[in-house]
Amino acid sequence: MSTEADRAEAPTAIQTNLAAIFVSLELSRSIWLITSLAPGGGEKMSKHSVRAGDIASLLARFSELKQKALARTGKSFPIVVIQEAGLDGFWVHRVLQNERIESHVVDPASIATSRRRRRAKADKIDGEALLRALLAYKRGEPRVCAMVKAPTPEEEDHRRLCRERKVLIAERVGHVNRIKGLLFSQGVFGYEPLRRDRRQRLDELTTGDGRPLPTHLKTQISRELDRLELVLDQIKLAEAERDALLAAQQTAAPASAGRMLLDFKGIGPEFAAALWLEGLFRHFDNRRQLASYAGLAPTPWQSGSVDREQGVSKAGNPRLRTTLIQLAWLWLRHQPRSALALWFKERVNRDGGRMKKTAIVALARKLLVALWKYVTSGVVIEGAVMKAA
């Protein structure tokens, strides 16, 4: 007598006993794709598109989803929404929260994808992947994705100060290099566009072969100086607003991270504001979360007998990471007797003077953790010199 092995029931692709209506938003400049999964609708994901920025149509679609679920099950369900952090910022997230809708913003790089060399990618596929990540996240699966903590409108606006200054500095460098390049083609060396007597010096310049500057070239350089002077004025205004923001924290209670960071020798207003507004205003549970946010977390590669380190992830805030690398070099100059500086010197000497760049990245991570402990718990860095009151 033949026996047939017991067959397990075919696993369902999606758990159907849902307690909410799950929705993913795939946002673009022209179309918003709404992918949803509602109770009573089976395993099929519903897709609907609205014009980008049309909040009224988006909310109308949500209302329609709730009515359909009510008609199928006789129960009313809340809506849970997920979207990727990206070009649209957080305004859609805030609109949904104001409508009492549970909304999540996810880091798109944290969602697992196929490791095939060529993989299909479309808004439809991405919308379904977002929805599956949301379902796993709500089930409590660990490390399924990384949700972004949206800053408040005030925190987001304050960050504009440091970011605008960096853009202006880049524009200043571009104008200076362009002027020097134009003069270099005529054999003119040593002209500094950032000096106050730049206009007077321009009138006195002669080419390498003894001729006065050509008329149209001099006119072009003069216009470049006009744009350069405008950028210099805007840099001063941005720095004045930054200093005013830090000064306002001098009397605030509790003390802000920006105000406390200014206590260290070697940390000026620009570094203090960048560290505060780009990272230390947030709450972190431990140093690993902090290092990961800055993109300074290690990325090991281990499989069988292969075990090597790939370096830092660089998956965090690039502005914060750049500021920390710059501050680490300055820390060695202004805080040479601190424990962190002594650790760096001992590490480099042990390697025979090599791998300074690798060690400076490690110092930047240690410095970030030490400054975080100082602004959150008041733990002063060992051996660090503080500014005179």
Image (cartoon, rainbow, N blue to C red):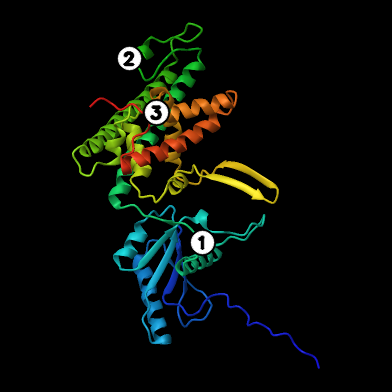
Q: Amino acid at mark 1?
A: Val
On screen, 2 above or below 87? below
Residue with the most extreme left position: 251
- Measured as percent of width and height from the top left, residue 74 is found at 38, 87
Residue 174 at least partly seen? no
Q: Which mark is residue 112?
A: none
Q: Amino acid at mark 2?
A: Asp
Front position among marks 2 and 1:
1
Would you say 10 lies left or right of 217 here?
A: right
N-term mark: 2 or 1: 1
Q: Assign the N terminus to one quadrant of the image.
A: bottom right
N-term mark: 1 or 3: 1
Residue 154 at least partly seen? yes
On screen, 12 above or below 131? below
- The residue that label 2 is drawn on is 197
Secondary element type, mark 3: helix
Q: Amino acid at mark 3?
A: Arg
